[in-house]
Amino acid sequence: MSPRTQESILVAAEPGAVCDVVADVEAYPEWSPDVRSVTVLTEDEGAWPVEVEFTVGSGPMEDTYVLAYTWALDADGVGEVSWRLVRSQKLEALDGRYVIAREGGGTRVTYDLSVELAVPLPGILRRKAERTIVSTALQGLKARVEG
């Protein structure tokens, strides 16, 4: 497994509100600029998304991939949401997680991501892309929850 990129942000909301936005994967195109479409393929008995198909990017950078989610959250939304790549044309791996933790009067969200492209890319460029993905996602998540 490749090194992971990690960043966190403080959101002015309860963990449950953050969890609600994270779990509403079909709304990601509304707040995540690179996500074009999302389709929930399967859900568990609690209606949590389990397998989800994403179409991201545009032109030559477009890809459609499927992620498998694992939800390990308490009733108040504190815990972890993780995912791993099931299939893709352009990715070998896409493993990540959100860790949602109560902090003061808000919620600390930590995003941890590792990406491996099917075509080799120098490590420094891959890490820069990961940092951009993580930062953009956290800013979008914060704006959506607080908005």
Image (cartoon, rainbow, N blue to C red):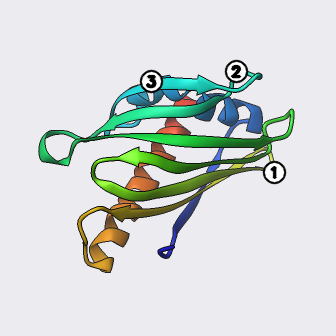
Q: Mark 2 points at which residue?
A: 47
Question: Circle 1 — which element?
Answer: loop
Q: Would you place residue 122 above or below residue 146 in this image?
A: below
> 10 Å neighbourhood of mark 1: few (<14), some, or many (≥20)?
few
Q: Which amino acid does label 3 sit on?
A: Thr
Q: Which of marks 3 and 1 is nearer the N terminus?
A: 3
What's the residue at 32%, 69% (across, down)? Answer: 126
Q: Which amino acid does label 2 sit on?
A: Ala
Tell me if 18 is positioned left or right of 14 in this view. left
Q: What residue type is labelled 1?
A: Gly
Quadrant of the rendered image containing residue 18:
top right
Question: Circle 2 — which element?
Answer: loop
Q: Name the residue under label 1.
A: 104
Tell me if 138 is positioned left or right of 100 in this view. left
Spatial CA span between label 3 and label 1 = 35 Å
Residue 69 x/y as whole percent: 61, 41
Residue 85 x/y as whole percent: 48, 50
What's the residue at 27%, 72% (across, down)? Answer: 125
Q: Name the residue under label 3.
A: 39
